[in-house]
Amino acid sequence: EELEPPERYQHQATDLSLLLECLKFQMKCPDLQKQALLTIHSICEKREDNVDLLREMGGVAFVYNLSKSSFVHPDVKETAVFTLGTLAEANVYCKNSLCKKETFADFADCLMKEDIPLKQKRLSVYLLLVLVHKSCFFCSVISFFCIAEEGQRICVAAFPVIKIWLQQLTFPQTEIFQPICTFIAMTVAHNSCVQESFSACGGLETLALTLGRLASAADTSLLSCQLSVIISKTLSACITDNSSLASGLAQYDVVLHLFSLLASPHLDPEDRLPILLSLGYCTEASGATALFFFSA
């Protein structure tokens, strides 16, 4: 691979430095700050080296501070959160540096305040999902974090926004299914209180309805089959050791959808076991559902 010319490297460093200066010294000009953030987004998108440049000059930390500041324009805060997502996607070191208690606490404040615009809440959840996606570091943090009372409060606060995302996702946006479902599964796993909170906000119902929509096309669509498996695994986490929630899924014909998914020609053999586990949780919780399953 041909090395990038030093002149171009220096040019990018100069541009990022000037943009950072604009962010710092144009606090009374939100339009200029927003444009500077969008330009940083363009320069750093999918460019790990450029994110390193920005980080070394303190730019990532400054953008993070903008995203949580109460003294900047709402549009600037929203654009800062969006830019952080871009930086985290492009640079693993940047992503891991954001996986800290303070970041999660800021999510909680944003998601639980009623006066925060919905767009800002969605962008906060977007950043959270970026941190979740393919991040072993995040998984190790969140697996402990969700046990703590504060961690549970933060994760539960994200559920209503995540439910809306699941309802609005379409096939061109399927790449976000995995991180959304990963977050749900990790936060509800073996925690009945959090499971109940997810169900109470309509999340469990949304998952069940989404499974029904996708499983109906699993016979003819590989993508539908793959997404159905992801949702099936997530449903399992939502109802494990919680018979009341598991029995409530009967009204959504979840057993029927899981049973038909098992017959899909696109189903990977290694995915049969988690689907069978999901069936087991559903049928164990409800005698009526079990009767339907065994007579099907």
Image: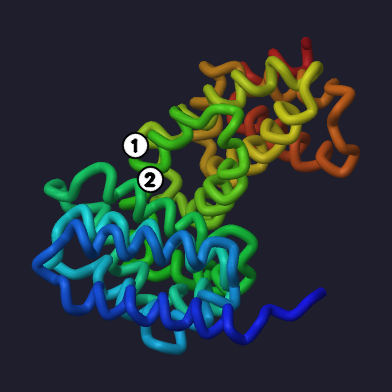
Query: CB atoms at circles 1 and 2 under 8 Å apart?
Result: yes
- Measure how far apart labels 1 and 2 are at the Cα level: 7 Å
Residue 270 location, x and y as percent? 87, 44
Residue 272 location, x and y as percent? 83, 37
Name the residue furthest front.
Answer: 7
Can you identify the residue that label 2 sits on? 159
Does residue 219 appear left or right of residue 195 in this picture? right
Quarter placement of the C terminus:
top right
Q: Please say if 193 is above or below 198.
A: below
Element marked by disc 1: loop
Q: Quadrant of residue 210?
A: top right
Does residue 212 appear left or right of residue 34 in this picture? right
Q: Quadrant of residue 101?
A: bottom left
Tell me the amino acid under the disc marked 1: Cys
Quarter placement of the N terminus:
bottom right
Residue 155 location, x and y as percent? 39, 57
Q: Nearer the viewer, residue 209 or 165?
A: 165
Image mark for residue 248: none
Tell me what residue is drawn at x 74 percent, y 35 percent: 226
Q: Nearer the viewer, residue 50 or 296?
A: 50
